[in-house]
Structure formats: structure tokens, C-alpha cells
Image (tube, rainbow, N blue to C red):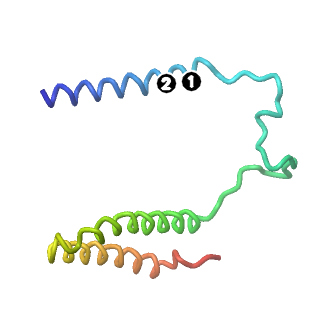
């Protein structure tokens, strides 16, 4: 029964994604106003190229923020059950912090934390 449910889920996902892609290619956005396709920047017309390339450092900084933000989400439930879980939970959180620390050390060595 479990494998049939998984196959049905996969087929449903493929059909929904495929129909969304086909529908979006058949029904393009219609507008008589060409200003609607311009990039919006506070009502000010752009000068020069509107597509800018950002350095990878901004993305790495954002991903590091998300990683350590999710760490805090895992830390709160652990802190509430530490007395009941005992030494096993303490060792597991030490392993968790070690892995995160290694990631932070790697980012620091690659100068990903420098904001230039």
C-alpha cells in the first residue's frame, strides 16, 4: 500500500507541475501598457543597464545567516528537554555545534564573512 501511495503522489506531482508549465506557456500576460514590463524602482526611471550582477559574497553571507538562524530554531526545543534527555542529548548537541563550528571556520578561512 505504501508504494502505491508514493507512486500516486509522484504521478500527481508530475501532472500538476506539467500542467502549470503548459498553462503558463499558453496564457502569456497581456498588457497594452509597456510601462508594466519596466522594472519598478520607486518611480524613478533607470539609467543604463537594469540587470546588475552582485558578488557571490552577499549570497554566501545570506546563506550563513539562514544556517545560524535555523540553528537557533533547533536549539530551543533541545534546551527545553535537556534534563529529561540526559547525556545523550548533550553529546548530540555537541556534535551539532561542532559541525556548525566547522562550517563557520571554513567560511571565516574563505573570507566569506568580510563585508566589502
Point out residue 65 in the picture as x, y percentages from the top left corner.
49, 67
- Between 45 and 71, the residue placed more toward the observer is 71
* Alpha carbons under labels 2 and 1: distance apart: 6 Å
Q: Position of residue 82 (x, y in %)?
A: 23, 73
Question: The N terminus lies in which quarter of the figure?
Answer: top left
Q: SS class of the residue under badge 2?
A: helix
Residue 64, placed above or below residue 33:
below
- Residue drawn at x 15%, y 77% is 87
| Rendered location of residue 112, percent (x, y) | 52, 75
Answer with the quarter of the image where residue 32 lies.
Answer: top right
| Position of residue 111 measured from the top left corner of the image (x, y, whole percent) | 51, 79
Q: Residue furthest left?
A: 1
Q: Which residue is mark 2?
A: 20
Task: Confirm or deny contact between disc 2 and disc 1 (CB under 8 A).
Answer: yes
The disc placed on residue 24 is 1
92 relative to 47, above or below: below
For label 1, the crowd category at 10 Å Cα-Cα, with few meaning under 14, some 14 to 19 and many 20 or more, is few
- Decide which of 28, 1 is in the foreground and name it: 1
Amino acid at each position: 500500500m505504501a508504494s502505491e501511495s508514493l507512486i500516486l503522489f509522484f504521478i500527481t506531482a508530475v501532472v500538476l507541475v506539467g500542467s502549470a508549465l503548459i498553462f503558463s506557456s499558453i496564457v502569456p500576460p497581456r498588457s497594452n501598457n509597456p510601462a508594466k514590463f519596466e522594472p519598478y524602482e520607486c518611480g524613478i526611471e533607470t539609467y543604463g543597464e537594469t540587470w546588475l550582477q552582485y558578488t557571490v559574497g552577499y549570497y554566501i553571507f545570506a546563506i550563513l545567516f539562514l544556517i545560524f538562524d535555523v540553528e537557533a530554531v533547533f536549539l530551543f526545543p533541545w534546551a527545553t528537554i535537556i534534563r529529561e534527555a540526559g547525556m545523550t542529548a548533550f553529546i548530540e548537541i555537541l556534535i551539532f555545534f561542532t559541525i556548525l563550528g566547522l562550517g563557520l571556520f571554513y567560511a571565516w578561512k574563505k573570507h566569506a564573512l568580510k563585508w566589502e
